[in-house]
Image (cartoon, grey):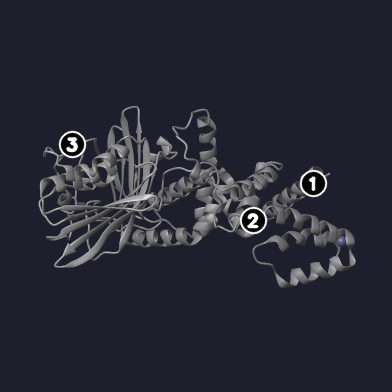
Amino acid sequence: MNCKEFKDKVVDLFDTTIDMQTQAECKAHMAECPECKAYYEELAEAFNALQPQETSSQPSISRPVCKQHHLWRPIAAAAVFLLGFFIGWSHLFSTSAVAETPRGQLFEQWIKSVQNVGSFQMAVYARTTSNDNFAYFDPKADFARIDIGLLRQNDSVFYRVEKQNGRVIVFDGQNQYMWVPNALYVKGPRAANFLEYFINLLYPERLLTMQKSAIDFSKKNEVIRTESDSTITLTFKGTEKNSDLQQLLETGKMGDCEVEVENVFTKNDGLLRFVKLWVVNDGQKTLLLHINNIQYNVMMSRVNLIQIPDTVFL
Amino acid sequence: MNTENDIKMKELAEHFQQEQPHLMRYACYRLGDTDDAKDALQDAFLKISSKFSDEKSVEVRDWRNYIFRVLSNLCSSRLTALGKLRTIPLDACLDIADLPTENDESDYQRIAKLLVEIPEEQAEVIRLRIYGNNSFADVAEILSLPLPTVKSRFLYGLEKIRKAMKQTNH
Ligand SMILES: [Zn+2]
């Protein structure tokens, strides 16, 4: 190999796979030609400088955004259970008309704390399947991750609810969009009941309000308050089967069950952080969903939050 | 969607999943933003999958190269679009705890500084080769360029980066 041949071949030493013979020939030439050796070493230095040092598979750069895209798996055409009825928007925010009792008031201050936040994001892990409706739960299913991001801005609400590898619902302040990648794309008005009773999980205050009204509704339901250095825990036990809370479990394979909910609040800001919800059926207690570390007032881009696929919605 | 394309959808998804680390890393270094990169990957997935529902049959000879080609093009148009959007402020309130770690950020900054020293056409070859982990032959196919052109762009790029490194060191 001469210098000209070396300069033609040297680039191949930076390919994904290196031909053994080329490598041997280049090495042999470099052993006797300091100039070509120096040239190769300079290239290698630049090549090494371009290698990322971080160990994770992807660099984490620039702004964090409340958004998760996990749409990598194909979705077989899913059965669509689009309930034909719409419920009024006001219903979603309404609290129970039942008169307050001191027991229910245990929830009051925590409800107020979360009502005033500007945004939050959380990951809900629920026993459900990725393509089914959000309100569909099945105690026999594995846990699926559901990411929820919500932003309040200028008297409007924007949200994104996304099942990992599955169904997504976005509300852009005017319309709701629901899709299952490559299977379903629908658009509806703000009052469209895409979320069904899952809407109660979209607002932490709503979940607390349901427990409060269940407590107020029946003496059979009870709440226990425990405390640690940094947290307060309210554990709700609902044996009564007609409360609002039961509606959350109306769709799916829940049968006739009792509900237990553990709500953990951080003391310093009074915000709900962790939720665990069990169903008790024939004495058997099953963890149906849990919410880990709800983040409040997080940096969130509205544009990203309400982004929808570039597809024509019906 | 016919059965044949159903099978293709499955293949596409498998390739996406398999190649996701490289696709992601490439897109991150191309776009300079993790979330933009995620979006670009999603766009690429949607774009390719919509082809299967639109057309009776799509022949894909090399999935990996095909996905990279679509992603590379989407990144280009995304960069053009971002240039226009940059003046619009983000609707954001800040949570300091969620900011990225300094190491990842500086690693990216360090490499981005090296890549601005060279023409974009050379930088793109380097990104596809190093961050996308593509062979030169693959890069040639992705960019629809002759193999010698790809190799010489890569070499010129490295030479220029080396020169720039020398200048900053002295
Ligand atoms: Zn030589």
In this rendering, the answer to whether A24 lies above or below A72 is below
**Residue type beneath disc 3:** Ser
**Residue type beneath disc 2:** Gln
Q: Is mark 1 within 8 Å of ligand 1?
A: no
Quick check: do tags 2 and 1 share a chain?
Answer: no
Earlier-in-chain disc, 2 versus 3: 2
Can you identify the residue that label 1 sits on?
A: B163
The part of the image, by quadrant, that contains residue B6 is bottom left
Give the Cα separation between the discs numbered 2 and 3: 53 Å
Q: In this rendering, would A88 be left or right of B28?
A: left
Viewer-side residue, B7 vs B71:
B71
Q: Secondary structure at mark 3?
A: loop
The circle drawn on residue A94 is 3
**Residue at coordinates 30% horizontally, 64% vertically from top-left?**
A142
Can you identify the residue that label 2 sits on?
A: A53
Residue A98 location, x and y as percent? Answer: 11, 39
Q: Nearer the viewer, mark 2 or mark 1?
A: 2
Q: Nearer the viewer, mark 1 or mark 3?
A: 3
Q: Is mark 3 within 8 Å of ligand 1?
A: no
In this rendering, the answer to whether B133 lies above or below A296 is below
* Res A203 visible: no
Residue A225 location, x and y as percent? Answer: 26, 51
Residue A257 location, x and y as percent? Answer: 14, 60
Which chain does the residue under circle 1 lie in?
B
- The C terminus of chain A lies in quadrant: top left
Q: Secondary structure at mark 2?
A: loop
Which chain does the residue under circle 2 lie in?
A
Judged from the image, the quadrant occupied by ligand 1 is bottom right
